[in-house]
Amino acid sequence: MSCICILGEISIMAAQNFLWSFTKNCFTFGLIGLTISDRYASIVPVRGSSMSPTFNLTTDSFMGSLSDDYVLVEKFCLQKYKFSHGDVIVFCSPSNHKEKHVKRIIGLPGDWIGTPMTNDVMKVPNGHCWVEGDNPSSSLDSRSFGPIPLGLIKGRVTHILWPPQRVRHIERKNHENILSPS
Amino acid sequence: MGLKPDPIIILTLIEENAADSVPQLTKPERETREQTQGKKREREMRRWGLLAKEALTQTLTFARFFCLFHVTNHYLWSPTLVFGPSMLPTLNLTGDVILAEYVSHRVGRLGPGDIVFVRSPVDPNKIVTKRIVGVEGDRVTYFKPRNGDSCHTVVVPKGHVWIQGDNLYASRDSRQFGPVPYGLIEGKAFFRFFNGIQRRSFMLVKEVQHGLHDRPVVCGHLIALDHWDNERCNSY
């Protein structure tokens, strides 16, 4: 009888120890993962077709989120906030800080952007940038909400990682609508 | 940090070379010699294994400490040094150490009257300290002391906040660069440690600037206003 009690106690203690070390390991790897994704790089899925054909070439509403492209977002650019024309970036939406958008930088501070609709030119103010999607017909970007502050940028997209047949490096593409100060 | 050559490794090498030139041994003698050689190799593999395990443990401890430090400084709280004239008389001209917390802005519990740290929309490398005057949907009335005391009213758009420094005469805030998107808010100030410390004596704490971007102003309130007035009011 006492043997069974002792065995029971030992197995409860072993289970507690196992649970405790499992929790500690989960916590450690969670912290490490959070730090790496904040400081160095993270992997995010891209939804929507505003950056076709660069991301999400096919938009089947049947497949939905199964055919999303997964991309590598690097955070080293946030040390000095130095970006170039044609970089694809992830930023917080200015109208809802919980949403993140992926677009391409078309204009940096000091550039003049021409809008073909109204034949207007406007200058991108200091500390802001002009972003546009690669698919202008279905993209909500600076043509609607204006230039965005560089501080809203949360990372730069460098590679597509999934699906395997679309693994590649994202190239910078230049736009014909801007006039840079020479 | 080089490792001293292991005597066991040297002996094993010498023995291996010697084995080629030694005359043929009888079978049992050959077997015992092979056994001892096998045991020696096992011992040296175990030694390398222990070394690798210890290196891994140390690296993991260091990584754990570094990650804990990063998560606390970005998601919980951290001490911050603030200086500048734009939040007088609430905060000091020459420097205050303030405990900034990073929880409220993530859960959306920020309202008018809170002192917040905001990444400047004019220069993303600088963080400024201001007070929230209006949130989205509020109607804010403000005046610009330099433009002939003209009064303006504006409605704060969705997803933005209106920030102003307490010292309206020496502050670059939403009156100059407009309402600021909520995503630029970095943290909220909620506790002040010291009063009036020198800027030079605090190097470990993250530095935050109030409203003057480059010049450390140390002299007195009115002289600070004159400097700021002459050099900055034409640059926006």
Image (spheres, rainbow, N blue to C red):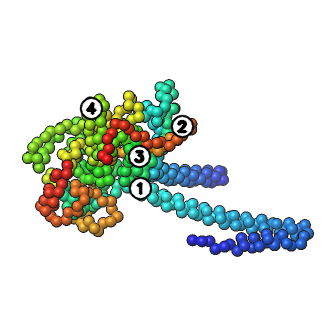
In the image, what residue occupies the spot 26% across and 53% down?
A: B128
Q: Residues within 10 Å of mark 2 (few under 14, many from 20)?
A: some
Disc 1 target residue = B70
Disc 4 target residue = A119
Residue at disc 4, secondary structure? loop
Q: In front: mark 4 or mark 2?
A: 4
Q: Residues within 10 Å of mark 4 (few under 14, many from 20)?
A: few
Q: Mark 1 near mark 4, Cβ–Cβ under 8 Å?
A: no
Q: Chain of mark 2?
A: A
Q: Mark 2 near mark 1, Cβ–Cβ under 8 Å?
A: no
Work out how far the residue at label 2 is from the one at label 1, CA to CA, in angstroms: 34 Å
Work out how far the residue at label 1 is from the one at label 3, CA to CA, in angstroms: 18 Å
Mark 4 and mark 2 lie on one chain; the one further toward the N terminus is 4
Q: Quadrant of residue A92?
A: top left
Q: Quadrant of residue A73?
A: top left
In the image, what residue occupies the spot 61% across and 51% down?
A: A11
Disc 3 target residue = A155
Work out how far the residue at label 4 is from the one at label 2, CA to CA, in angstroms: 38 Å
- Same chain for the residues under marks 1 and 3 in the image: no
Q: Residues within 10 Å of mark 3 (few under 14, many from 20)?
A: many
In depth, the one of B228 and A35 nearer the eye is: B228
Mark 3 and mark 4 lie on one chain; the one further toward the N terminus is 4
Question: Farthest residue in the right direction?
Answer: B26
Q: Chain of mark 4?
A: A
Q: Mark 2 near mark 3, Cβ–Cβ under 8 Å?
A: no
- Same chain for the residues under marks 2 and 3 in the image: yes
